[in-house]
Each structure stands twice: as C-alpha cells, then as structure tokens.
Image (tube, helix red, strand yellow):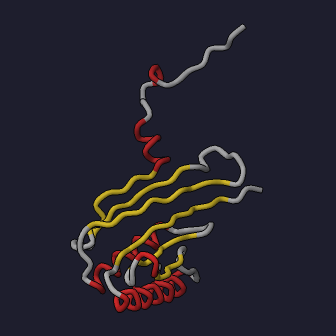
Amino acid sequence: MADFFTQFSCHLDVCSAGNARRAEDVWGELAAELYREDGGYPGFQVEVDHEHGPGALWIHSDEYGEPEHVIRFVLRCAEALNLQGCWGFTWSQSCSKPRLDSFGGGAHVIDLGKRQSIADIDCTRFVAENMPQDPALASTAESVP
C-alpha cells in the first residue's frame, strides 16, 4: 500500500506580535469552520517563527497538507490584519512508492491588498494542458530488433 503526501513550508509576515496572535485566532476560526463543514481540521500548522521576526508565521505540513486551507487562511489574515503586497507558496506531492500520477506539486500567488488569488499552477494539470493534442507529435518509441 502506498502513502501519498502533500507537503509545504513557508512564511507569512504579519508584521507584529499582536498580528501574529490575531492570526492564531483566525486559524482557530478556520479550524472550527472546517470541523462544522466536514468534520476536518486545517491541513497545516501555524507557529510564530521568532528567529525571523515577531510577526513571521511559519506555515507548514508534515505529511498531509491542504494547500486550499492555506489559501483560505492567508486570505482571511489579509482581511483581518489589512495585509498588503503579494504572497505565495509552493507545495510538493509525493508518494511512498513509485505510482503513475502520484508526484507533482504546485504554487499559488495572492494579492493580499486585493484579497484575491492572482496566479496558480498545478504540475499535473500543466503537463496535461501542454502535451501536444496531435498524436503525430506525441512521443513514440520504436522497438529495436
């Protein structure tokens, strides 16, 4: 049996220790909402990374991350804390055994001031969308006698 993983590690600078405490409240509100909706919890952890500043939030997942939950959290922090600028993160998808279509990843960029996503990419979707549709252009292998 194979285990599938989604992992990430990134910072969100919320500018102050007070904002970091408020961001932890936002995380708690999101956790309660996810539990009410489907009995789940956020697919990530948040900790203040004092080494990088009083408002540096370390957002990470060990094995089973949920990038969509991170996006919801960051957009809510942007609203609650009036964050400005752009922010983004990347994630990886892997598997404990070699399986087709089990490896990839993605990235997402958010305009914090506008409170909206501005770009994203999913590696699996990227490959599918950019493969030639013409069978003549697809890779073929000839057998060697």
- The percent position of residue 79, horizontal first and vertical second, equals 28, 82
- Viewer-side residue, 113 vs 49: 49
Q: From this viewpoint, is residue 70 visible?
A: yes
29 relative to 132, above or below? below
- Viewer-side residue, 64 vs 49: 49
Q: From this viewpoint, is residue 73 visible?
A: no
Q: Residue at x 60, y 19 (%)?
A: 141
Q: Quadrant of the C terminus?
A: top right
- The percent position of residue 139, horizontal first and vertical second, equals 52, 24
Residue 82, picture quadrant: bottom left
Q: Residue furthest front?
A: 51
Residue 108, picture quadrant: bottom left
Residue 75, picture quadrant: bottom left
Q: Residue furthest top?
A: 145
Number of on-image labels: 0
Q: Residue at x 43, y 78 (%)?
A: 57
- Give left or right: position of 19 versus 131: left
- The percent position of residue 45, horizontal first and vertical second, equals 53, 78
34 relative to 125, above or below? below
- Give left or right: position of 65 versus 27: right
121 relative to 89, above or below? above
52 relative to 16, above or below? above
Q: Quadrant of the N terminus?
A: bottom right
- The percent position of residue 48, horizontal first and vertical second, equals 46, 82
